[in-house]
Amino acid sequence: MISESFWRGKRVFITGHTGFKGSWLSLWLRRLGAEVTGYSLAPPTQPSLYELAGVGDLIDAHHGDVRDLPALAAVMSRTAPDIVLHLAAQSLVRHSYRDPVETFTTNIVGSTHVLEAIRGVPSVRAAVMVTSDKCYHNEEWVWGYREDSRLGGDDPYSASKAAAEMVIAAYQHSFFGPASGRPLAVASARAGNVIGGGDWATDRLVPDVIRSLLAGEATIIRNPGATRPWQHVLEPLHGYLTLAEHLWADGRPMASGWNFGPGEDSERSVGWIVAELHRLWNVERPWVQDANPGPAEKTFLKLDSSKARAYLGWRPKLGLTTALQWIVDWTRVYQGGGDLRAATLADIERFMAIVPAA
């Protein structure tokens, strides 16, 4: 549940506000009445949801790199947030092979800088550090990974997220414990394979399909048999907001890792996702196997979100076909040159109607 009265007037600092998830989150927090400060690089894609929805017009936006600690700390100190939501990341597995240094410095050093900036700003009372489901060492088994499962990764992206989790835990124990004398609680949040309108990232399945549909071209996919648990972007964002509320109210007992994964009915193969999007778009078109699929990818990974259900009352709300239909509806507005801020806020309103307010 989301408490509108809780968020009204809260000063919230978001890193990565120009990204796909960050743009959705910024709009949602403004809808809830929060005062939002964003710190991020320029939008990572063209087009971008951030620019299409005019997100920068609604928040106090600052362009900067989380790898630049003095700049990050200065903005956070000046704006004195109550809550920090860290989303800034290099978030693409294939890109991590092309530029592992950027991946490690952004995801590990960048996360360290956010924590260090928080350490120097007394106003911060709750922080959610977003990592990834890929922080877990992938055993290729059918069971969901729990928060105490082994961390690790065979590729630079996964390894960087596992390392970020270790950094977060170190700060929790070394600097944010009872001895700090601060009412501050910091937690990590793990989700993955997030989909939604306005995602234009490269080497990501749903954006690749949407681009092919808009262009009227064949859809090229790498691993049609790979199975993933898919979730609409509003699902994990709902989890992050709920977790932040509990960190504020309940403090350090909630300062740990949290999974926000979809239900088992959302575990579908890449080939199924492509076929379903084609059906919802009302076209019949075969997909084409990529002749150069690139580095090997894991075939299966899922999260066990029992902890979030038990302690936060969080659970996924949208079925997978509904999530895909919302993406198609949003993309039709884009295709027709419509108001994309209004379309995004309409999806937020639809979701809030499903999730009762506290």
Image (cartoon, helix red, strand yellow):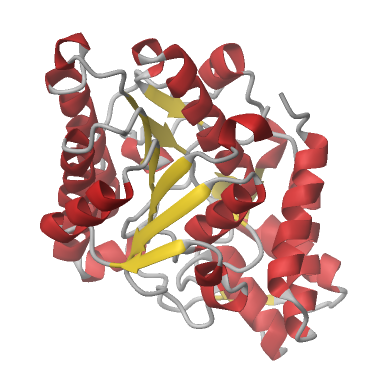
Residue at x 42% of width, y 74% of height: 43
Viewer-closest of 103 and 151: 103
Residue 87, x across and y down, in percent:
39, 50
Vertical side of 251 occupied by 13: above or below: below
226 sits left or right of 232 in the view: left
Residue at x 62% of width, y 46% of height: 33
190 sits left or right of 311 in the view: left
Residue at x 44% of width, y 26% of height: 258
Quick one: quadrant of the N terminus?
A: top right
Q: Is residue 322 visible?
A: yes
Can you tell which quarter of the image residue 287 is in? bottom right
Residue 187, x across and y down, in percent:
36, 27
Can you tell which quarter of the image residue 343 is in? bottom right
Vertical side of 139 occupied by 278: above or below: below
Outermost residue, right direction?
282
Viewer-closest of 337 and 222: 337
Quick one: quadrant of the C terminus?
A: top right
Viewer-closest of 291 and 335: 335
Vertical side of 224 occupied by 82: above or below: above
Residue 291, x across and y down, in percent:
46, 79
55 sits left or right of 76 in the view: right
158 sits left or right of 206 in the view: left
Q: Is residue 225 visible?
A: no
Residue 313, x across and y down, in percent:
64, 18
Q: How many marks?
A: 0
